[in-house]
Amino acid sequence: MSNNDLVNIERQKKVLVDLMNDKFYVPMKIKELAVILNVPKERRPELEAVLSELLAEGKISLSKRGKYSISKEKRYTGIFTSHEKGFGFVTVEGIEEDFFIPATKVNGAFHKDTVEIIVDPVPTGKRKEGRVVRVVSHEITQVIGYFQKNKTFGYVVPDNTRIAEDIYIPGKFTKGAMTGHKVVVEITNYGTNDRKPEGRVTEIIGHVNDPGVDIMSVILAYDIPTEFPVDVMEEVESVPDEVPEKDKEGRLDLRDWTTVTIDGDDAKDLDDAITLFKEGNNYKLGVHIADVSNYVKEGSPLDKEALKRGTSVYLVDRVIPMLPHKLSNGLCSLNEGVDRLALSCIMDVDPKGNIIGHQIAETVIRSNRRMTYSKVRDILVDHDESAVAEYKELVPMFELMKELSEILRNKRENRGAIDFDFPECKIKLDEKGKPVEIKPYDRNVATRIIEDFMLAANETVAEDFFWQELPFVYRNHEKPEKDKMNKLAAFVSTFGYTMRNSNGEVHPKEVQKLLSSIEGKPEEDLIARITLRSMQRASYTPECLGHFGLSAKYYSHFTSPIRRYPDLQIHRIIKEQLNGKLNSKRIDHYKNILGDVTKVCSTYERRADDAERDVDKLKKVEYMKNYIGEEFEGVISGITNYGIYVELPNTVEGMIHVNNMRDDHYNFVEDTYSMVGERTGRTYKLGESVRIVVDRCDKVTKTIDFLFA
């Protein structure tokens, strides 16, 4: 090793490890290494420093006799997920089980860091453990949290409870923040096992009690863009308010077809419309989707910003749109009584629900009525006289929609499609952003009609382009992992249920049968949730891998280009194919970009889902704060070794900690998922109705604590 090799410590480490790997097969003391590596005596301390770092990283080992050698320990690189109690887990690509990292072996790793670990030997049958030896890179660069001021400094409690340490803020970097402010902090030092992370305040969001600050904190934490750049808004200004006549030319004119939109009462971006009538014994179903790609051109500022967002984000008090409102609520919204450009999938469906023919076309449509789910339900379920009279000319079509919807749904169920029908919630806020009502979302006949028709169009379009062997974006839900299915089958067997599988290979029909058999049973919610967690997560890819949950070979997202970028992307491909422009050059172009596009879209979809879930949790906690000390009836929805979860009729869930079950000492019985008292034998089981009292609500951890009444 020459003197020049001792300039940079990282360079030193690499050179030394390479040489030890290549040259030395026996352990050596530092003196021997220094001689062979040609390190002069005066530079020996630098060699010792390099060896110390390599030891800390686990790349070399030191024997009791003081001899160094290349480490033979197994090393992996993966993503570190922290726990609020200090320990964590490392996920390594290609390895199913995570590695457990005890708090004493985290070695300064931060949540979401890419780290290098060494796996510790453990007795057979126990979870694999490891220790972090090196942080490769940091993912998180800023944190949102609650500021607390001290005399000469401050510190921030992160909103993300997985970040176990408070962030120390030197006095000169507080930006004037006071106790109670929610702030954005840039991390300047990630800390070590013995030293807290440090940072500086870059933005004061507002006081924790100010309206909207809680939700804005979530938005900023997920780095969701809320404002559109100047160049995007300038491009939008050039978009006309109404469809120019020249844009309608050459399109299939469907303006004389009776067409309706059916959406929620407060929906503003109406991106799908429906036509339905019969031709003989068959149904003619038209699903018309706003032609967003006519206005959002590939590579334009609008397009780049849409990809950057990936999806619209729907929070309880606002929508953060993928496209500016002039498009999403204006020219690309299929509003009643105006001409709009659409991309239509027109399907011929036989009485058994088979799609026996279809046409995909650029169209111009005019919606006859803007309908809502509640109005259609009033007509079809409640037979409300005033609603029937108001829409009398449309009632026969709605009845036909219900008829076809049931046929399509039965066909899907017969092939094995799975319906995870968990109750979603509707949270109503007052003008100050305070939650005033929480109730289950009404999934009625009208929502099912739209769902069934959209699924039919999505499958039809996906199958069409799969067989054309053209580049495309598919919505895939891959088969569950065999090991997870084996574990699920073993789990449900403890409740007396069976799920046939062949070495972990399960047909979706078996999952559907399981969910049907538990319907209405006390254990329904637990088994359904564990079954859902055993599934893969749906994602976008350029490859058609099938949709396990729908038991569909071909599936895409075609029906929402206003709010989902993958839909916008495939609209472009479809239109180029329809117009004969999808030549070899364009095919190669799409083959080159779709891998990255689908990866980005899948990532941003998860971001939106997580943000929406966090905001719902926040508002549920805030709502239940008004009822501390009050009594409610709920149902036991989950049991763990640390407590019992109880869900109220309004979908709010809280936990009774085992330490607060004071009438006895209770033990969790894993085989039966029950909690049993040692002295009294009192047993709590899933699905049991119980009376609870609201004890504590914590907006920081987004948790609600109950006590038994």
Image (cartoon, rainbow, N blue to C red):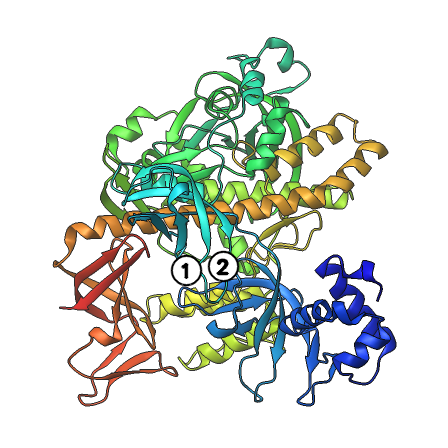
- The residue that disc 2 covers is 191
Q: Is residue 330 above or below residue 594?
A: above
In the image, 290 versus 389, the foreground residue is 290
Amino acid identity at mark 1: Glu
Given contact means CB atoms under 8 Å apart, are the residues at marks 1 and 2 in contact? yes
Number of numbered labels in the structure image: 2
Q: Is residue 33 above or below residue 214?
A: below
Which three-letter amino acid code belongs to the residue tagged 2? Gly
Q: Position of residue 426 (x, y in %)?
A: 31, 44
Residue 612 appears at what percent x and percent y? 41, 46
Which part of the image, by quadrant, shows the N terminus? bottom right
Quarter residue 49 falls in = bottom right
Placement of 278 over or under 256, stated as above or below: below
Left or right, 368 with respect to 707, comes to: right
- Mark 2: secondary structure: loop
Q: Image point 35% across, 48% down: which residue?
A: 153
- Is 601 in front, or is 553? 601
- The mark nearer the N terminus, 1 or 2, is 1
Residue 560 % position (x, y): 54, 36
Q: Quadrant of residue 509?
A: bottom right
Residue drawn at x 59%, y 58% is 551
Where disc 1 sits, the SS reads: loop
Q: Which residue is mark 1?
A: 165
